[in-house]
Image (tube, rainbow, N blue to C red):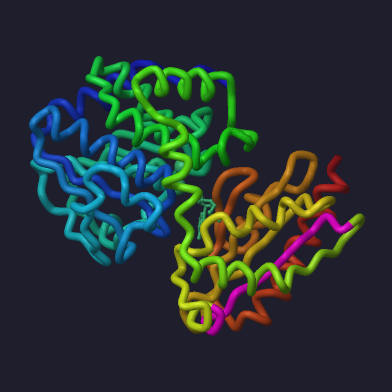
Amino acid sequence: MSEFPEGLLLEASGLLSSSPSWTIFIHQKADGDAVGSAAALFEAGRLQGRRVRWVGPDKALPAPFLFLPHTEEYLFFEEFAFDDPEELYVFLDSSNEDRGVRGLRSRSRETVVLNLDHHEDNTRYGTLNCVDPSCSSTAELLYRLMRAGDWALTPKIAECLYTGLVTDTGSFMFSNTTPRTHRLAAELLSLGVDPSRVGSRIYQSRSLASMALWARALSRIEVWGGDGEFAVTWLKQDDFSLAEAVPADTEGLVHQLMTVRGVRFAMLLSQFVPGQVKISFRSEEEMVEAATVARGLGGGGHPRAAGATVEGALEDVLAQVRSELEKRHAEWIASR
Ligand code: AMP
Ligand code: MN
Ligand code: MN
């Protein structure tokens, strides 16, 4: 992979430093990388005396991340007016214009949008696009931006960035974990991060309701294909209400399917609203890529962690995704 141009990081940090007022946006179904990066940038902005706001399309941030600074200042907007030429609109961890609040597509021409991301399929929708798929996480990219701009890295900022790093790499176990990721983790620890504090905040803060939800999904896992290499499970609206769980409680669930011996491709179908199914895809190396199957259904994402949203009844979408997977898998086999 070619080296990401340092100049672009400088340009992005320069744009931030020359803008007195920032609005930071994160994607829907916010994860640790989105929240951690936003909290880090928010804190850095405040330290530099900027006016900072933080906006997203989820009603609330996931509970495990509420220990991070400034999460109490998060604002929920379904739709946002992008019409202030003096404001810097910063998008974090958002691969396209439709993964966040509505309104970005109809922004006025003179608005300035800074797109900071690490998704390979980022559509480069910003005025300035600082997108580096070689970064494990947006947090890793943001760290490099802060270093390039010679910004102060406080223990608080380090803890936010570490949260993004640890969650997007599956605790340093996913294939996006590189030597640079580990060097960055070491650097963040040197800056004062307590990994056991962050670990227990994020991973030992489950609600009983989310356990009950997972129990329902785990009890109906289906495994099929060659040596049982495909796995799928699903959750309907009923499951959420019976477990008293919320959509954010599905975070991490699809990964559980990958822990079954032999499973190399996993899918979770969740029906949060009637007539619409959100699908999460995960794949291992030497297997058709998650992103290929997701794209076949109108979605996208990282090669091995992708998603899509499909209209229809759950049973129909289930049949559709199974056949899409089998078709793409057969194509992948044939192309080897
Ligand atoms: P998730 O399974 O929701 O954790 O999503 C995994 C990855 O897939 C995310 O990092 C997103 O980049 C991407 N993704 C999820 N849903 C969609 C979607 N509807 N369209 C495009 N990309 C998606
Ligand atoms: Mn994310
Ligand atoms: Mn990310």
- 189 displayed left or right of 16: right
The percent position of residue 116, horizontal first and vertical second, equals 35, 36
235 is higher (above) or lower (below) than 1:
below
Quadrant in which the N terminus appears: top right
Task: Give the quarter of the image for residue 169.
Answer: top right
- 53 displayed left or right of 166: left
- 332 displayed left or right of 207: right
Is residue 229 covered in magenta? yes
- Identified at 27% across, 66% down, the residue is 78
233 is higher (above) or lower (below) than 303:
below
Task: Give the quarter of the image for residue 213.
Answer: bottom right
In this rendered view, identify the residue nearer to me: 320 or 110. Answer: 320
- Identified at 82% across, 51% down, the residue is 261
- 134 displayed left or right of 146: right
The percent position of residue 317, horizontal first and vertical second, equals 65, 75
- Identified at 87% across, 58% down, the residue is 228
Quadrant in which the C terminus appears: top right
In this rendered view, identify the residue nearer to me: 264 or 78. Answer: 264
Please report the bounds of the magenta region as a residue range. Answer: 228-239
Is residue 112 covered in magenta? no
